[in-house]
Image (cartoon, rainbow, N blue to C red):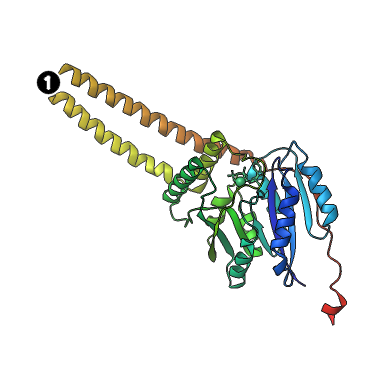
Amino acid sequence: MKKVISVIAPMYNEESLVREYCETTFRALEVLQEKYQIEIILVNDGSKDQTWNYMLKLQENYPFNISTVSLSRNFGLEGAVYAGLQVSKGDLTVVMDADLQDPPHVIINMVEQYEKGADIVLAKRKKRSNDNYFKRTSAKWYYILLDELSGKIRLERDVANFRLLSREALNKLLNLPEVNPVFRVTVPFLGMKTAVVEYERDKRFAGETKYNLKSMIRYALDSVTGISIEPLRKLMILGFGSGLICVLFLILTIISKDAWKTSFFISLVISMFFCVMFFALALVGEYIGQILLEVKRRPTSIIYEYNPRKEPRKESIDEIC
Ligand code: UDP
Ligand code: MG
């Protein structure tokens, strides 16, 4: 029996690229078909356009290769990815963006690394010349921050959701007890034998990004609180450092003879104190929010409809003989 590669493609309002995504992916992975069966798991994350209808139509065309999953509403990328992971029956599972920014041909290099023994293969973005300046800069700082805060977890920068997991790695991932996971944080937590392949990120094929500034900040906060409690520890250093600066300003205030300087230093100390306090409170609040979500134990997403691909026909006579 051939091993199965399940490729998970989460989609939210992507009617303009469902067909193109599937056809490009099948074409790119043709060379693997001698050794593997390719399955694409299309996950509809509560789209309001024709995405789901198009997925079902495509499944009619490729019944042996496409599974379709529809969530009960829009849960966000993590919910869609985890729904795909839950239904994946593949010996290898690949998660990627469906807008073709993650080029499907990279999966061939990822499978090569798997064959060399890797349990997890990360696709690392070499260049992001197709992203605008804001996206490039914010992503750069996001990865630096996450890396700094990751503690003992080894994090590869510039790696998003484009990853391959062996069956063993996927089982371990799905056994983690958290209900509000962030895929790019839970995978490095696993450790295991990890390989990296590099690629150039393409332009979005059609449609628009689903991430505005607000959702990007929310995602960054989920990642930061999800990775470790290191930020809380760093908060102690911040508190100590700002305490020292306050003492310094206080001394300057005492030795200063000018009244205007005195009032300037005092107001500076007070504003600094409030900034640090509010920042600390907000961070602690984020962690409490995460605890609440975990305590409620609501699932990451709810699958409303799942149509597995048809079982492939028996191996051809040629292959049996
Ligand atoms: N996506 C999703 N649910 C959402 C938002 C996005 O399933 O709530 C999917 C989207 O359809 C795409 C992938 O996640 O396949 C990445 O989204 P996008 O291209 O908007 O992100 P960007 O590349 O701009 O970071
Ligand atoms: Mg994109």
Quadrant for the C terminus, please: bottom right
Residue in the foreground of this view, choosing between 256 and 61: 61
The x, y position of residue 4, in whole percent, is: 73, 65
The x, y position of residue 111, in whole percent, is: 63, 67
Q: What residue is rendered at 76% in x and 50% in y? A: 19
Residue 201 falls left or right of residue 251: right
Residue in the foreground of this view, choosing between 275 and 109: 109
Residue 174 falls left or right of residue 142: right
| Label 1 Cα neighbours within 10 Å, binned few <14 / some 14-19 / many ≥20 | few
Residue in the foreground of this view, choosing between 209 and 3: 209
**Mark 1 CB lies closer than 8 A to ligand 1:** no
Q: Is residue 226 above or below residue 159?
A: above
Q: What residue is rendered at 41% in x and 29% in y? A: 278
| Kind of residue at disc 1 | Lys
Quarter of the image where ligand 1 sits: top right
Secondary structure under tag 1 reads: loop
Residue found at the far bottom of this picture:
321
Residue 134 appears anywhere in the view: yes
Total number of numbered labels?
1
Residue 87 appears anywhere in the view: no
Quadrant for the N terminus, please: bottom right
Name the quadrant containing residue 311. bottom right
Residue 102 falls left or right of residue 142: right
The x, y position of residue 279, in whole percent, is: 41, 32
Q: Which residue is denoted by mark 1 in the rendering?
A: 257
Q: Is residue 306 above or below residue 262?
A: below
Q: What residue is rendered at 43% in x and 48% in y? A: 144
